[in-house]
Image (cartoon, rainbow, N blue to C red):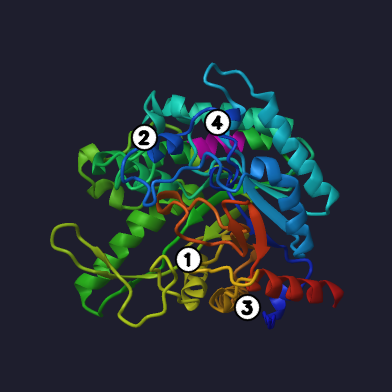
Amino acid sequence: MTTNFSVNKQLSSTSFPIGVATSAFQIEGGRDSREASIWDTFCTKPGAVKDGSNGFVACDHIEYWQDDIELVASLGFDAYRFSVSWPRIIRADGSINQQGVLFYTHLLTLLKQKGLKAYVTLYHWDLPQYLEDQGGWLNRDTARAFADYVDVVSRAFNGLVDCYATLNEPFCSAYLGYEAGVHAPGKTGKQYGKKAAHHLLLAHGLAMQVLRKNAPDVTSGIVLNFTPYYAASEQQKDCAATQLAHDHHNDWYVRPVLTGKYPELLSLLPEDEQPDIYEGDLALISTPIDYLGVNYYTRSFVQHDDNEGFTILPPEHGAPVSAMGWEIFPNALRDLLLQLHRDYDLPPVQITENGMACDDVLINGEVDDPIRVQYLQDHMNAVAQAMESGVNVTAYFVWSLLDNFEWAEGYLKRFGIVYVDYSSQRRVPKRSAQALKHWLTRRQSV
């Protein structure tokens, strides 16, 4: 098995953390030891998850966590990014689930013993169902409940965390969950999306204040997903449509966080689609962050649409795509970082997720995924090119450590560098994991 892996010198320095990431609902299982989340409920809706599966067991990380952390260490990574399950910490009656707290403190302690940096995401889409029953992210009070949860967690984890992320991809929570309806809780309607987004961003701002108080020496920020948009033609209407898509899906989240202002798009929205913004909200949302987390997977082309203003096109025929049908185009990650660098006074940037789904098959105890190896190498080099042009990137995380529950796709798509046999819970490092291990080991010996 070849393990050639060559990455630009910027990322080859041992002072630049290279890590691997997961999220709670996607791997933990342990449904009987926590409250229900919106994803538990969503999975029961016919047709909501393509294979009809759920996250009740997933990768059973709640049982195999020690083996999984040992796996991260054995592969040579510097850091592990994971999320905390809110329903595992706070019960419906408001009391603290000490068993849940202990699970994470034990995990964090083992990370420290292994010399791995702990990057903790506080919200990765698994809102407690008891809060959704009160309106979820359409209810302003959910932002305050999140701050209270962050207070509990950050005090319990004192001295064990290297980096906090308040939210992971609020676009997905707001747009996919409350507007398009393809993710939990499955609400549909343009009147919901921007309102949910505002409350999510408010939750971020409130949580940052808690983290500044409870963990002043810990690096803290937010993780946003970005899709670089390219005009389908040089026609003015397609260029305008491309900017509109960017304002809706990218700028709507990063601009208020970094500048305290929403895009001009706000004033153009129908009144029923505008969020309820109170005095002081944007000052909270723009509480200074130590870093901006960037999740990147693909790019998209945009065309003018007479009804919606823009339409996002599928990849061109013949373009290389992942098993998700997403175009593989590494240079778009470089373009994205340079665009953010031009548009904003950026804090340090972390690439908090980057990876691809492949149609991986276990054959004779091995999984050969050369396309993923090439994907990761090319995208890391794109990051290095952005760094050479002045973007201050300070970490890179592969998505994901394990094959897992891929949300509305169920278990049909495999993003892991480690293959999971869900019937036996056997973990098998793929060729990509071996290539990364070889490179990381070589990097540490230089």
- How far is the residue under mark 4 from the one under mark 2? 28 Å
The answer to whether 367 appears left or right of 103 in the picture is left
Decide which of tag 1 and tag 2 comes sooner along the chain: 2
Is label 1 or label 3 in front? 1
The answer to whether 142 appears left or right of 189 in the picture is right
- How far is the residue under mark 1 from the one under mark 2? 31 Å
Residue linked to disc 4:
87
On whether residue 189 falls in the magenta region, the answer is no
Residue linked to disc 2:
277
Residue at left offset 59%, top offset 59%:
400
Compared with 338, 197 (above or below) is: above
- How far is the residue under mark 3 from the one under mark 4? 42 Å
Residue linked to disc 3:
388
- How far is the residue under mark 1 from the one under mark 3? 21 Å
Q: Can residue 214 be seen here?
A: no
Is label 3 or label 4 in front? 4
Q: Residue furthest top?
A: 93
The answer to whether 304 appears left or right of 73 in the picture is left
Quadrant in the rendering for residue 300: bottom left
Expressed as whole percent of the image width and height from the top left, the position of residue 179 reads 30, 44
